Amino acid sequence: MKTRAGISKRFVIVIASIVSALVLILAVAFNQVLRSNHSIINRTIVSGQERLLLGRGETLARALGQRKAVKTAELAREIKSACRTESDCLHAIVFSRTADENYFRAAEIIRINPAFETGIARDSVVREDREAGYLKRGLFEPTVDPLVRVSAGMYWQNVYIPFSLGKKEVVLQFSFSSSGLQAALDAYSAEIGRMKKIVALLATALVLAVFGASYLFMHNFTLLIEGLSTSIRKASAGELDVNLNAGADEELMELATSFNSLVGGMRERKEREKIFEEKEKILLELENRDTLGDIFKFGVTLLKENRLDDAAALFTTLTFLKPEGFGSYFNLGVIHARRRDYDKSMDMFERALQVNPGNELTIRYIEKIRKLRRGNETTGDRAPA
């Protein structure tokens, strides 16, 4: 039964794109929240400033009303005197009505701050260029122009207060400093701008991190697949000395470990087959021998070639075929001595001595083995040759 792959490069790219899109959507949504909050805070601050300025204008108008000035010149002097206690009052103008209700004449210009200039001269006729018509509204009720104006580095707002000058109705325009308001708005706008930049940088960093991690994963995955393909080709060609790097993700590590186990099992099987072939070769050679003497000589040859396992197996077989064979026991004693298995070596030499009592060479070997068994064996000791 065929199974579909659960992961691919396209799948990783799709997931990375979805995550990046979500990050960008969250960043845009957060930006909209900041913009909305900025608008709300601005309106709140400006509204509070308007109420404050309106209260200050009405307070000045009440104070001027108590002084009962009847001429514009007298009113101008009273305004200048009253505004000296108002540090934020920059300028004042007394507007009187004309025959056309859309036009007003600047009856008096009161300069509180010499550096402040509106560009309106005394006795000039002005008409507001704004649709709100604050001068006209100022004839009937106190009004604040929400527009913050700037000139020569100074920020201000205009307040329009209706005032009765004898039997004549005029409009008092007070220009109050809004530097504190503007500084607060600028600071808040700068902080909002800084937060927007941080959000943009974080969103960009997250998108780059997602695609970077996706690229590293796909690169690692590709390297593993390429390594697996190369190793499979080598293994199919008979080269079993291959291994995959298992230091990857958990799933990929399991794949590499499974492949390495498979190749290891194939390698062990090949080694066992090689050993079996060698033993079969030995048995075949033994079958071609006519006498036990030829077999014994072949065992001696194996011993000289230091093929101890094969020689031991052959001499052990000879002890069953010819129990009285001195040479088989003697050579088995030599083999076990080389293996440092002194107990078995002593047993074989004693059996050889029983078959051939008085053999001096066997006696000397027995003495050497006894010395080694008594505790004189060290790392540098050598077995008797």
Image (tube, rainbow, N blue to C red):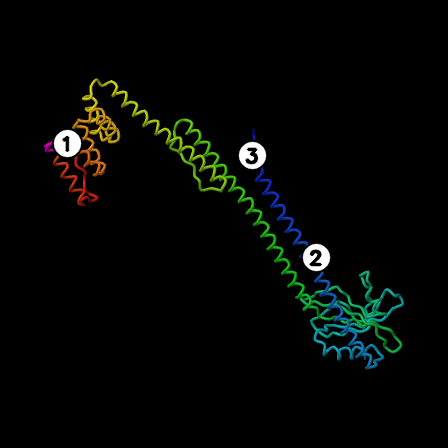
Indicate the secondary structure of the residue bearing disc 1. helix
Q: Which SS does the magenta portion mostly show? A: helix
Using residue 52 as the reference point, say whether residue 313 is left or right of it: left
Q: Find disc 1 in the rendering and name its residue.
A: 354
The kind of residue tagged 2 is Ser
Q: Find disc 2 in the rendering and name its residue.
A: 36
- Between marks 1 and 3 in the image, the one whose residue lies nearer the viewer: 1
**What mark, if any, has residue 5 been given in the picture?**
3
Indicate the secondary structure of the residue bearing disc 2. helix
* Residue located farthest toward the bottom when viewing the structure as drawn: 67
Q: Position of residue 235 (x, y in %)?
A: 41, 29
- Between marks 2 and 3 in the image, the one whose residue lies nearer the viewer: 3
The kind of residue tagged 1 is Gln
Cα distance in 3D space between marks 1 and 3 = 74 Å
Of mark 2 and mark 3, the one earlier in the sequence is 3
The kind of residue tagged 3 is Ala
Q: Is residue 322 above or below residue 194?
A: above
Based on the displayed image, in which of its 4 quarters is residue 191 positioned?
bottom right
Q: Position of residue 185 (x, y in %)?
A: 67, 64
Q: Residues within 10 Å of mark 3 (few under 14, many from 20)?
A: few
Q: Residue at x 47, y 42 (%)?
A: 248
